[in-house]
Image (cartoon, rainbow, N blue to C red):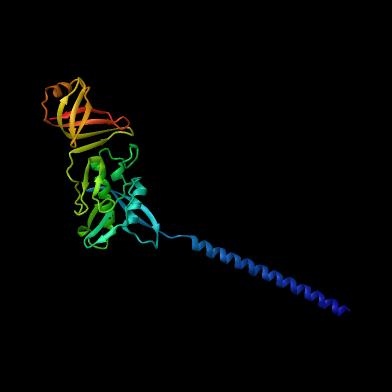
Amino acid sequence: MRRKWLIAVFCIIAVMILCVGCGKESEESTVTEEEKTTEATEEKLKNVTLFIGKQDDFGKYNWLVKENETVTPDLLIQAIADTTGWKLSLAKEVEENDDGYIVRFSKDSVFYTGQGTDENNEFYIPTEEDFYKTVLDSIVKTVSKYDKADAESTNFYFGGPGEDDLLLKGINTTLPVTTAYNGTLPQSHRSRILRGANTTSYDIDCVFLEMSGDETVKLEIDGEEQICSVTYTALKPIFQRSVKGRQMHVRITEDLDTEEKLIVKIYY
C-alpha cells in the first residue's frame, strides 16, 4: 500500500514539473514571436533632399522615405507638394523620353488654380511669374539630382492634361510641352500681383477706347472690351485727353467677388 502511495506522489510531481516546463516554453515562444513582429513593423527610412527655390537660390529640405522605396520623379514632385503646400497633382505619371522627362499637370494643380494667399506661409511668393518659375525650377533641380544621367543634359517638358500645353493662368500664357524648359517663361503682357483672397492686381497691356462718364473707362484687354473705373484724381485727365486706339500699360486692381476693375496706375 505504501509503495502504491509513493508511486502516486511521484506521478503527481512529474506532471507538475512538465506543466511548469510547458508554461515557460510557451511564454518564451510567445515573447519570441512578439519580438519578431516588432522588428518586422519597424521600417527603416532614408533621407531625400529637396531643392526648393529658383536659379542659384535654392533651399535644402529633408524628406524621409522607406529605405527600400524607389525614388521616382513622381515621388519627388509629391514630396515638394507636401513640403510647400503647393498643389502639384499630375494628370498622369511622369514619362521618360530620350533626353529627359515629360511632366503633365492636372487642372487641379496650381498652374490652373493659382497660388494660395497665405502671406505668412514660408513658401508664399508675391508675384505669379516668380511663383511659377520657383515651382518649375524646384522640380527640375530636385529631380535632376536623382537622375541617372548627367543633370546638365536632362531636359524637362511641362504640359497640361491630354496633349495640352501647360497653362499659366495667372499670367495668361502657356508653356509649350514640345519645348524643353530652359529656366525662363514665355513673355507675357500681363504681370499679376497677388493681393488677397478677394482681390488681385495685375499689370497689363490694353487699348484705350473711350472715357464714359467721369470715372468710367472703356478698354480693350485680351481682345475683349472691358469697363474699368478710374477714381484717382491724377489719372482722370490722362484718360480724358487720350484718343481712341492709344496703346497703354496700366495696373488694375480687381475685386474677385464683384469683378469690378479699378485702374490704379498708368505706366509711361
Horizontal relation, residue 253 to residue 2: left or right: left
When the figure is inspected, residue 113 is found, relative to residue 71, above or below; the finding is above
**Residue at 18% in and 41% down:** 188
When the figure is inspected, residue 172 is found, relative to residue 155, above or below; the finding is above
Horizontal relation, residue 93 to residue 264: left or right: right
Residue 178 image offset from top left, x and y in percent: 20, 54
Residue 236 image offset from top left, x and y in percent: 17, 22
How many numbered discs, if any? Answer: 0
Residue 18 image offset from top left, x and y in percent: 71, 73
Residue at the extreme right: 1
Quadrant in the rendering for residue 180: bottom left
- Where the N terminus falls, by quadrant? bottom right
Quadrant in the rendering for residue 25: bottom right
**Closer-to-camera residue (238/138):** 238
**Residue at 14% in and 29% down:** 208
- Where the C terminus falls, by quadrant? top left
Residue 103 image offset from top left, x and y in percent: 27, 54
**Residue at 34% in and 40% down:** 121
When the figure is inspected, residue 239 is found, relative to residue 106, above or below; the finding is above
**Closer-to-camera residue (92/63):** 92
**Closer-to-camera residue (133/7):** 133
